[in-house]
Image (cartoon, rainbow, N blue to C red):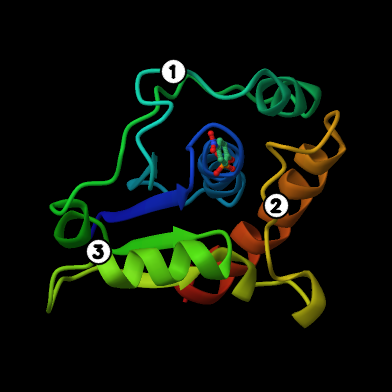
Amino acid sequence: MTKKILMICLGNICRSPIAEVVMVDVLAKVKVDGVVVDSAALGSWHVGNRADHRALSTLQHHGLKSTHIVRQIKKQDFNEFDYIFGMDEENMSELRRLAPKGSKAELLMLGDFGLSKDNRIIEDPYYQKGAEGFETAYQQCVAACTAFVNQRLLK
Ligand code: 4NP
């Protein structure tokens, strides 16, 4: 059965578009078909924009590309998607607050898969100087998406 995964962060221009592209790449590498992956923002600031240029160049550096256009999360997402991933604790409390009662989606923090306890938060790199934080987020996403797919989709 088709599974649907939604990657969430605050702005949908840094972490979640990276996580979306990485999840698609990991699924392709392990030959899991039929999983739909999307991303969205908690906030509305960047709706209609593409990812931050540092996110795009980080992905490009790894041979990947995002064509995602920012959208804001909506109530229906909680019943349409099977898994909704946040990047940090603030994302998770906002997701729990927004989730309609009894909705289908499992709310998970991405870094709870495959990352050590002191590295499980995927920090917001937006206000950091340069692109180093984007590379860190990318590496965290690779480890976490790989672990999630192995633990939850390949069983
Ligand atoms: P993201 O980073 O949540 O990883 O996309 C941010 C991007 C923009 C803003 C905050 C976080 N902002 O406040 O505009």
Residue position for label 3: 98
Q: Nearer the viewer, residue 9 or 45?
A: 45
The amino acid pointed to by label 2 is Val
Mark 2 vs mark 1, foreground winner is 1
Alpha carbon of mark 2 to alpha carbon of mark 1: how far? 24 Å
Task: Confirm whether residue 153 shows in the render.
Answer: no
Q: Residue at x 70, y 72 (%)?
A: 114
Residue position for label 2: 142
Above or below, 117 relative to 15: below
Mark 3 Cα-neighbour bin, 10 Å: few <14, some 14–19, many ≥20: some
Mark 3 vs mark 2, foreground winner is 3
Asked if residue 82 lies left or right of residue 147, the reply is left
Answer with mark 2 or mark 1, whichever residue precedes in sequence.
Answer: 1
Answer with mark 3 or mark 2, whichever residue precedes in sequence.
Answer: 3
Residue position for label 1: 49
Q: Position of residue 31 (x, y in %)?
A: 52, 48
Q: Secondary structure at mark 1?
A: loop
